[in-house]
Image (cartoon, rainbow, N blue to C red):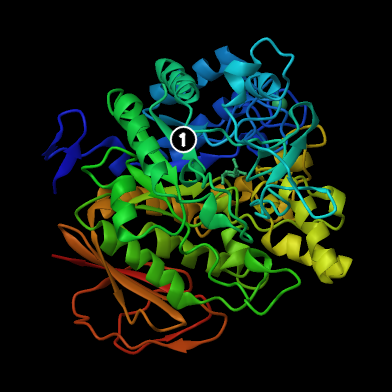
Amino acid sequence: MYFFNRNKGECVMEKKWWQDAIIYQIYLRSFKDSNNDGIGDFNGLISKLDYLNDLGVNAIWVSPHYQSPMDDNGYDVSNYYKVSKDYGNIDNVVDFIEKAHARDMKVIFDLVLNHTSDEHEWFEAAKDPSHPDHLKYHDYYIWQKPKYDNEGNKKMPTNWRSWFGGPVWEYNEKTDEYYLHIFSKKMPDLNWRNENMKNDLKAVAKWWIDKGVDGFRVDASNHLEKNWDFPDAHPGYEHFSSLPKHHEYLEEFGVEIFGPNDIMAMGEAGGATKEEAIKYCGYENNEFDMLIHFGHCWADCDDSNHITPGKWSKGKIDVKSIKNSFNKWFKMLNGEGWNLIYWHNHDHPRILSHYGNDSVYHNESGKMLAYILYMMPGTPIVYQGEEIGMTNVDYENLTDFRDVEVYTEYDNFLSFGATHEVAMQTLRDRSRDNARSPFQWDSSINAGFSSTTPWMNVNRNFSAINLEKQIKDETSIYSTYKSLFKLRKEENISDGILEFIDIENDSSFIYTNETKTAIFLVVSNFTTHKIMTNLDIDINGYENIYNNYTNRELNKEMKLLPYEALVYKKKK
Ligand code: GLC
Ligand code: CA
């Protein structure tokens, strides 16, 4: 297999570290608290490096650790050069990087380039004409004068809807302008048409590279360009997402910063076409090395629901569309770029509650989801707690939730006609906070996360679901993850070729992954009922290597129990 080496500008027979990596995503606030203030931090993370190493992880992606008022848990950066006091200080960060490297683990930081906090000094200057640096920083952000209706009332420049639910505009009295924010109003969007602004962000990336970082995950990377004609459209996403020019910005950043410093970069973008996918992460392009895409993430929305609409509406899981999304990405990038695989991140519900079944089939569905994902080629990202089958939150009060998005959308649901109970169930099913409750280390107070009340409540199921319990148990979800990660490396699973079988079947999830030395076959039932399989392949020579009920000989026709999944191997 050939890999494009950006430094040499040519294709070589050389694999990059991230093509063999298992990336583990850390949501720092909720991973491990070391100083008992209820908030996860770098020293807590350092104390768990041996755990991660033992699990088989070899790269760690850490959610934003920069100084921040924490409106969006750090995605609202107020100083890129300072570490949030919640998480520690720069010495702790450097210590973390060194200790990860000492264990042969790479470090990936989150780079937030689309917006800053409204408490960033650039914005403080930008919004205030009396600030000495006002003229320098005003154009670092996106401003528009108010519009007026026939009665002379002030109107927003457009009716666009922010990703978090409300309008994208906020009025600033001192300049008589609105600023654009496609996320929360405390996160003003940066103006990528401003050269000085771009250079300041490049300097930020370079500064952290010099601290020893091996890679970046570039936040909200498809939103950098906006339609400056500002036409009305609701929600209007096409005017602030995936506009052609954002590729130019990313290319420039890649050529100047990532490439020359041998930095692995992964972007975040939904809905890419083949042409765009290649631009983002084709071997011969300079934007990113891999892309976090969302095709498989919301395969169970109910379009007829107008009370809790869009991603908030829970419908039947469309298994076909999940398979088709994975398949599409493998086919699109085949030989031209490298794929990234994951179930969910900090912006989604917990996979076991979302696509599995956390009540009756916790262990079975947790393992099924594990086999399906981690037997696929590409580079996986595992999200903290996924390896022990953590579930959605069980909060009863609105005030138990922490996410800024929850509060705007809760009001929206009520205004669309939802009762409080319906709105609360929607939050428990679909909100981002589901993935953000503290890691369940053991059955001691606060699940071993902290000895004080955590910033966000632990899930009450922690005495049943925790690491300490699972680590001792060979049949646990944790043991399955660990074993799959070992197998991935031994068998070069990441290099294989993926072929789905009966992809249009809406209950089964069956595929082969053919590596240089073996064919792996994953046969599974993605539903709560029994199904029959019909395998139209040569079934000779396959040996069962994983199962979540019992070992069974491979047959063309097999009756599969709820969430039953089996992995077979045939040597070549
Ligand atoms: C990305 C992050 C999300 C954040 C948003 C704004 O989508 O993953 O958590 O809220 O960008 O920074
Ligand atoms: Ca702490």
What residue is at 54 percent from the left and 19 percent from the top?
93
On the image, the x and y values in percent for residue 88 come to 64, 19
Asked where in the image residue 326 lies, by quadrant, the reply is bottom left
Q: Residues within 10 Å of mark 1 (few under 14, many from 20)?
A: many
Above or below for 286 versus 522 = above
Number of residue marks: 1
Above or below for 89 versus 527 = above
On the image, the x and y values in percent for residue 259 come to 28, 29
Q: Is residue 403 visible?
A: no
Q: Does ligand 1 reach within 8 Å of label 1's beta carbon?
A: no
On the image, the x and y values in percent for residue 303 come to 62, 76
Above or below for 470 versus 28 = below
Label 1 belongs to which residue?
A: 60
Above or below for 420 versus 502 = above
Query: In which quadrant will I find the C terminus?
Result: bottom left
Q: Residue furthest top?
A: 132
Q: Nearer the viewer, residue 213 or 177?
A: 177
Quarter, ligand 2: top right
What residue is at 61 percent from the left and 34 percent from the top?
28
On the image, the x and y values in percent for residue 273 come to 35, 60
Q: Helix, strand, or loop for circle 1? A: strand
Asked where in the image residue 558 lies, by quadrant, the reply is bottom left
Asked where in the image residue 352 lies, by quadrant, the reply is bottom right
Give amino acid for label 1: Ile
Q: Is residue 66 visible?
A: yes
What residue is at 22 percent from the left and 81 percent from the top?
539
Q: Nearer the viewer, residue 213 or 101?
A: 213
Q: Nearer the viewer, residue 492 or 228?
A: 228
